[in-house]
């Protein structure tokens, strides 16, 4: 993979699922920005939010972005839903957006086997009304930043993987 793939999109749209499937199919490893922050802080994201606040978490995301810019090449990077606000996002690689309506995402989270855990680990999704407001605020920004937009509502996982592989120049 020549360039980094930077996978962005709203909480619960399926970045983790798509990234893991990509991993399996193309025998790559995924860098997950939330995982990097959790391991550095030795705390779960929801605990970082509760104990240190959102601004601190966003500063951690900027640090990760700076590290990617200086040190990571040819990798697949799955980003937290708010990671798009880092100031150097466009310099990190090819931006791939997983896109779906808020209603579809909400339904997906509610229908998941481990729905409670999925919602609990995302402090910004705890209230539906506020999550929807956040979605509306971000929708345009996500699309503006994206080099490739993947409509996950209407594509199979296999079709999504093909589009990402194309963006990564793997297929
Ligand atoms: C956030 C999304 C989360 C996580 C944090 C904040 C956001 O990641 O980074 O809870 O601001 O949208 P996921 O998109 O993987 O849920």
Image (tube, grey):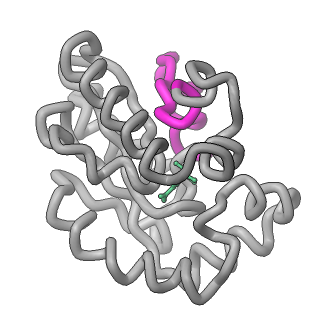
**In front: 34, or 10?**
34
The region drawn magenta spans 17-36
Q: Is residue 14 left or right of residue 135?
A: right
Residue 139: x, y in percent?
A: 31, 75
Q: Residue 118 lies in magenta, yes or no?
A: no
* Residue 16 position (above or below residue 92): below
Which quadrant would residue 21 be assigned to in this image? top right
Residue 127: x, y in percent?
A: 67, 80
Residue 99: x, y in percent?
A: 39, 67
Residue 26: x, y in percent?
A: 47, 23
Q: Is residue 78 left or right of residue 12?
A: left
Q: Is residue 98 left or right of residue 32?
A: left
Q: Residue at x 46, y 81 (%)?
A: 101
**In front: 138, or 53?**
53
* Residue 48 position (above or below residue 154): above
Q: Residue farthest to the front?
A: 52
Q: Quadrant of the C terminus?
A: top left
Q: Residue at x 37, y 39 (%)?
A: 59
* Residue 143 position (above or below residue 131): above
Which quadrant would residue 78 be assigned to in this image? top left
Q: Is residue 23 left or right of residue 142?
A: right
């Amino acid at each position: 993979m020549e360039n980094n793939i930077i996978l962005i999109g709203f909480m619960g749209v399926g970045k983790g699922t798509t990234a893991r499937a990509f991993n399996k199919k193309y025998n790559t490893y995924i860098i997950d920005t939330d995982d990097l922050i959790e391991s550095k802080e030795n705390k779960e994201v929801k605990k970082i939010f509760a104990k240190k606040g959102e601004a601190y978490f966003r500063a951690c995301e900027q640090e990760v972005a700076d590290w990617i810019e200086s040190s990571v090449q040819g990798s697949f990077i799955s980003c937290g839903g708010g990671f798009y606000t880092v100031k150097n996002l466009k310099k990190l690689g090819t931006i791939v957006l997983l896109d779906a309506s808020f209603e579809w995402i909400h339904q997906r989270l509610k229908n998941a086997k481990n729905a409670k855990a999925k919602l609990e680990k995302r402090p910004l999704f705890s209230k539906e009304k506020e999550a929807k407001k956040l979605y509306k605020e971000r929708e345009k920004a996500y699309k503006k930043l994206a080099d490739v937009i993947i409509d996950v509502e209407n594509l199979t996982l296999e079709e999504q993987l093909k589009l990402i592989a194309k963006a990564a120049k793997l297929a």
